[in-house]
Image (tube, grey):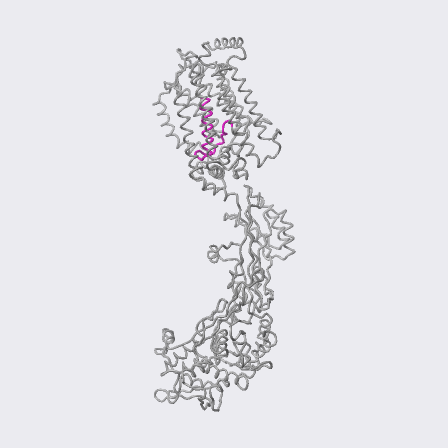
Amino acid sequence: MSLLDEGLRTPAGPSRNRPHGNVAVLRAFILLLFGVLTVRLADMQILRGEEFAQRSRENHIVRTNILPTRGLITDRNGEPLVKNVGVYSATILPELLPDSQEARYRIYLRLQELIGVSPLEVQTRVDEAIAAGRDYIAIRIATNLPREAALALEEAAVDLPGVSLEVTPGRQYIAGPAFSHILGYIGPQTAEEAKVLRPQGYQLNEPVGKDGIEAWYESDLRGQIGYTAAEQNAQGKLITLLGRQDPVPGNTVRLNIDAGLQQYVAELLQASMADNGSGWGDAKQAAAVVMNAKTGQVYAIVSIPTYDNNIYADAQRRAAELERIQNDTVTYTLLNKALNPAAPGSTFKLVTATAGLAEGSITPNTSFQIGCSLDIKGENDVIYNYPDWRCHNMLMDVRAAIAWSSNVFFFLTSGGDLERQRGLGKDVETSGAVLAAWARKFGFGKPTGIDLFGEAAGRVPDPQWKRRTKVGEGFAPGENDWFLGDTYNTAIGQGDVLATPLQIARMTAAIANGGTLPVPHVADAIIGPDGKVVRTIAPQGETIDVDPRWLQVVREGMLGSVQYGAGARAASSKTTVAGKTGTAEFFKPDGTKSQHAWFTGFAPYNDPEVVVTVYFDIGVGGDKAAPVAGKIIDYFMEHVRP
Amino acid sequence: MTSVTLGNFGRARARTSFWRGWDRFDYVMVAAALALVGCGLALIHSGSRPWYDGPITSLASPVAKQALFAVIGIAVMLGISRVDYHRFLHFAWVFYALSIVALLALFALGSTAYGSTRWFDLGPVQVQPSEFAKLAAILCLARFFSEHGGDARDVRSLLLSMAIVAPLAGLVFLQPDLGTSIVFGGIWLGIVVIAGANRSHLLIMGAIFLAVLPFAWTFAIADYQVERVAVLVDPNEDPLDSGYNVLQSQIALGSGQLLGKGYMQGDQTQLEYLKVATKDFIFSLLGEEFGFAGAMVLFALFILLLMRGVRAAQLAGDTAGQLVAVGITMLILMQTFINVAVNVSLFPVTGIPLPFVSQGGSSLVSLFASLGLLQSIVMRHRSYRQT
């Protein structure tokens, strides 16, 4: 016995006393504890059981998305303009890297050998990601790897923990720079786009169309995402495949564009940029629209300069090129010039002529003796002199005026001379307003509705607009009044009026087809993966409220222009061309005066099929734009015409 | 006095036939325990599938190992039930001293896992001294009270009894093993209540305990324990770290719903989201695969077993036997409660196995040893002694 034991023994203590404890309390305690556990268990398994069952499913069922094959884009003959390619990227998942810095650096060095990335840069990015607690998100360290490098990386990745090769769907634009403005490009979603696209079922890694047809027809091209559902264990290993939903490939978009024509026009414009003796200098920008005269189907729409839209997919390596086109403030490469407004010059006289005939300020037989300019006696007998672009010295009706592009004739048609000849309206302001209304009837001042992004509305000035706009700083009081000169300027497409080449083409189409203003469409049809047409993009158009007789008179004038007038150089050996030249004065950013060159026309004269509009930022319409239009019509008649 | 007792019983035993007393052997208690072991074997089989795919007859099989330990445990139980429990009471202080030494030695020689040093690694087997210490504490407390008038009515004996348990509980707490030290507390409380402790004394002590708790929280409880309590409140707070086991056991249990997902069909278990599914979290495995219904069956078996333990206390021929029976019942009750409470997230993770069910040899053998003690008490109860 221990000392402790001895010391504690009480005198009364027999070791075999009868038990006296009441064990009922023990029974109650047992039942109490199990009661507590049962209540808790009932709460978890019965009341909240479904919630936990759901979490259990989420725990182990992983859904892996399979991105669909994006639909192709073809020209009107089915020739593909794009190709789907795999984009190879090297990624690092920081949490899978070895723990020791030294082992990590060995991996970075190996990556330098394989794909030429700087180890220090990789290290910085990995360390930053770890510091920010994002070590479970893969970092893309190099993208657009060449195929050989990608294969080498894939082989080596087995021994490089954390490194892997990622293949994402990409696009290669195979038709050349002439198509860049039409096709646009695809790229990763921006944060703002992701917010909009997520509710539509987009995955974060899914590329989206960014511009052009790629963006406009995104929902047709995308297809439907597929997925596999698999059971995954706690280590992240996939155990069994539970289900699979195959992705549905996107639809093909067939364009109205004729690839050959588009390419031809782009090359032709490019080759015609140099100054051809006008003395105004080389053109820097140009645009052309070739369109079905009745339906508005766009056969070619070209903007110069062009660029290679494959740059976006390879932005990392071609950063300098991308930088250059994105910050181009001289020629604005990325801007589609066909959708960008400029002073339309004399092409606008077609609107003035139609307005004059319709409003009765002239008749088909009205003739004026046109000299070198028009003198108008203003208040206090001040004589204002409005010059023509050259001395005509002949008696002209409206047909001849269109053919020779007389300014004075259309001054008289639009604003009158305040004495014998009346204008479109009863006074100066009304004439301006009526002319503006006719411009709007022909689709000016608002977008045409073409299936491309970035289209400008242009501008149609009228007295109200002027009153509203030309006030405040930089304007003298009363400068916002509408003067006779404003009507005159607008009548010949100068001053404040602005129109896009596409708007000019559309107006020309309306005149050519007898009064229907078509909505231009680049795309023709959506075609399913099985080759069947899912839907066609139906031609749309609105009928202009104008007597077809007046349009016939205007067409006769346009025929004259090409046959004997200012647009003679647009003549084609293959068909009869009718058209109108335009040479619009404008001030360059440096303040010096220059001229835009325009030509818009249609062919064949008797049954118009095609409208061609050509624009150069610098040049003279008859010299520079007209010959190009003639060649385009030649090509069309020979190669495109069905 | 003690030596006389020993002498008497030594002779009595010599004269007793081997078959005497077996008619009083508590077969119901053993049946309940074996049913629990059977449940355990089935669950271990299911829970070990992700990491063991060998034949079930191999000794490497966790099921076979557990069955082997059960056989050893039953042999130990039968052996002990043949021995008069007074013989163990006689050596109570020796056991006590051995326990203290073993627990101290653990700090120098023990194996550490999950930041806690709880056992000796003796080649094929691991010995957990705290299992032995729990029985030693029960024997010492029973002996102490039986030698002091058989009750704990006066403060002096109450405090002394506490002083007996405190060193053991304290050493276990330092391992650290919060759960087992609470089991010690439960054993002590059960024994002193049955030994007739004054209710007001207990209330005062309880009040003092609650007053000291905040300081203990700050100074004596390790950070990991604080964290475990914190994740208990909201396991989603840190789902990939400390909260992981808690969260996964909740999901496993809850997703079992009323009838469970079916045997070997629990995806939380089979896909290894549930950790230590055959040991500390075997109850979650049961809950997932057999649902609320399965848990109720298990509870019924435990309640049956524990009630047989209470019966042993009621039948016990003397105070010492009664208190030993109470202590053992409390031991099993507290371990079961804490283990299930951990599984249902009412208690922080402490690493206490579910008695008779969880995989683990030393726990199983020592539990059968305690059942042997209970049998020894039942077989020598009052009516038996009077014949």
Q: Give left or right: position of A178 versus B247.
A: right
Give the percent coordinates (x, y) of residue A207: 53, 58
In the figure, residue A625 lies in which quadrant?
bottom right
Instruction: Examine the image and state in which quarter residue B108 appears.
Output: top right
Placement of A440 over or under B158, stated as above or below: below
Magenta stretch contains residue B172: no
User: Where's residue A538, x and y in %?
Assistant: 50, 68
Q: In the image, residue A278 lies at what x, y percent?
A: 55, 82
In the rendered view, would you say A589 is above or below A549? above
Viewer can see residue A242:
yes
Residue A591 visible in image: no
Q: Magenta part of the protein: which range?
A: B327-356
Q: Does the magenta stretch include residue B353?
A: yes
Q: Nearer the viewer, residue A85 or A469?
A: A85
Residue at the farthest front position: A532
Left or right: where A515 falls relative to A309: left
Total numbered labels: 0
Q: List x then y, in percent, for residue A33.
A: 41, 29
